[in-house]
């Protein structure tokens, strides 16, 4: 080892001892992910009857999947007014869940029937169904990342967008601990963002490792003590990649928000 390389190795070790270890000696990977704040950019009306389980942005509009037996639907929604422009009722035996746009098809999950519906994007006409082995909670797709499903556990399932077979899974963790109750999903700039059921937090997840990169704390978006029945939990994330707009709402919330995270 030359004198230069020895000096360089010592420098790297010194930097790592400061940067890679926390005060209690834990490695950086074991530290909880940082918590980020938000500001509201815009707020829009949202159908307070929509028990939002899936939210997708495409070409200046939202597609939305609503849940509950007898209230489940697939919708196309005008952003500015929250007006439902197109709707299809889901049979009362099904509790609809996550929604993703895959090419010209809308793919909708059901909660416990292990049955997915594929619709024509334009007409909402049913094309086919498919099955999966878990519960169905959240669903998201983008061309780069692929189709990803959550089932309320700490596992994300990456599906083949043509056959819906499982390609791989990843366990989601923060500081090495499992993050369960992963719900509505969205691909945002290479990360998977996930609502965590019964919380006001969104996890920003590395699709490769499952590690939570950061949390977005939305506790103050519509504080729980001010929520009026039948409004339920925060759920629903959509992303406009061209304008980099992030939208969030909740189950039976009367408003939908564009937020900026910092
Ligand atoms: Ca979504």
Image (cartoon, helix red, strand yellow):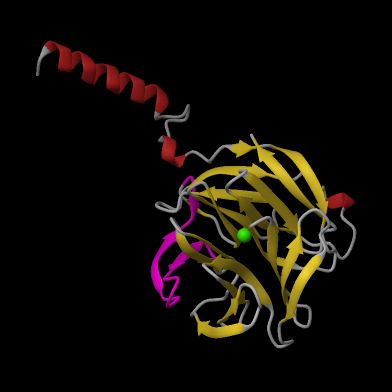
Q: Quadrant of residue 234?
A: bottom right
Q: How many marks?
A: 0
Q: Quadrant of residue 46?
A: bottom right
- Point out the residue furthest to the top here: 3
Q: Residue at x 78, y 83 (%)?
A: 70
Q: Quadrant of residue 111?
A: bottom right
Q: Residue at x 32, y 19 (%)?
A: 14
Quadrant housing the N terminus: top left
Instruction: Pick the residue in front: 124 or 181.
Output: 124
In the image, residue 108 sits, relative to residue 255, either above or below, namely below
Q: Does 224 sit left or right of 55 as displayed?
A: right
Q: Position of residue 18 (x, y in %)?
A: 40, 22
Judge whether residue 57 is colored magenta: no
Quadrant housing the C terminus: top right
Judge whether residue 159 is colored magenta: yes
Q: Is residue 217 visible?
A: yes
Q: Is residue 221 visible?
A: no
Q: Does 49 sit left or right of 174 as displayed?
A: right
Q: Position of residue 224 (x, y in %)?
A: 82, 52
Q: Dividing the image into four equal quarters, which quarter contains ligand 1?
A: bottom right
Q: Residue at x 75, y 75 (%)?
A: 87
Give the residues drawn in magenta, as a range. 153-175
């Amino acid at each position: 080892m030359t004198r230069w390389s020895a000096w360089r190795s010592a420098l790297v070790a010194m930097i790592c001892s400061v940067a890679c270890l926390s005060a209690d000696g834990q490695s950086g990977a074991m530290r909880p992910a940082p918590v980020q704040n938000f500001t509201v950019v815009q707020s829009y009306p949202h159908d307070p009857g929509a028990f939002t389980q899936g939210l997708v942005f495409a070409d200046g509009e939202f597609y939305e999947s609503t849940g509950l037996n007898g209230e489940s639907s697939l919708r196309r929604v005008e952003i500015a007014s929250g007006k439902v422009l197109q709707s299809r009722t889901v049979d009362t035996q099904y509790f609809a869940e996550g929604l993703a746009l895959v090419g010209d098809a809308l793919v909708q999950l059901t909660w416990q029937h292990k049955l997915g519906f594929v619709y024509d994007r334009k007409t909402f006409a049913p094309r086919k169904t498919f099955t999966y082995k878990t519960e169905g909670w959240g669903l998201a797709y983008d061309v780069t990342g692929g189709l990803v499903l959550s089932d309320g556990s700490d596992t994300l399932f990456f599906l083949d967008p043509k056959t819906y077979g499982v390609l791989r899974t990843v366990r989601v963790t923060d500081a090495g601990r499992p993050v369960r109750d992963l719900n509505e999903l969205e691909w945002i700039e290479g990360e998977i963002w996930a609502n965590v059921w019964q919380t006001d937090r969104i996890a920003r997840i590395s699709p490769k490792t499952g590690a939570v990169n950061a949390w977005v704390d939305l506790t103050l978006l519509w504080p729980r003590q001010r929520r009026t029945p039948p409004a339920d939990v925060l759920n629903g994330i959509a992303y406009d990649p061209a304008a980099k707009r992030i939208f969030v709402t909740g189950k039976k919330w009367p408003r939908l928000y564009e937020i900026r995270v910092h």
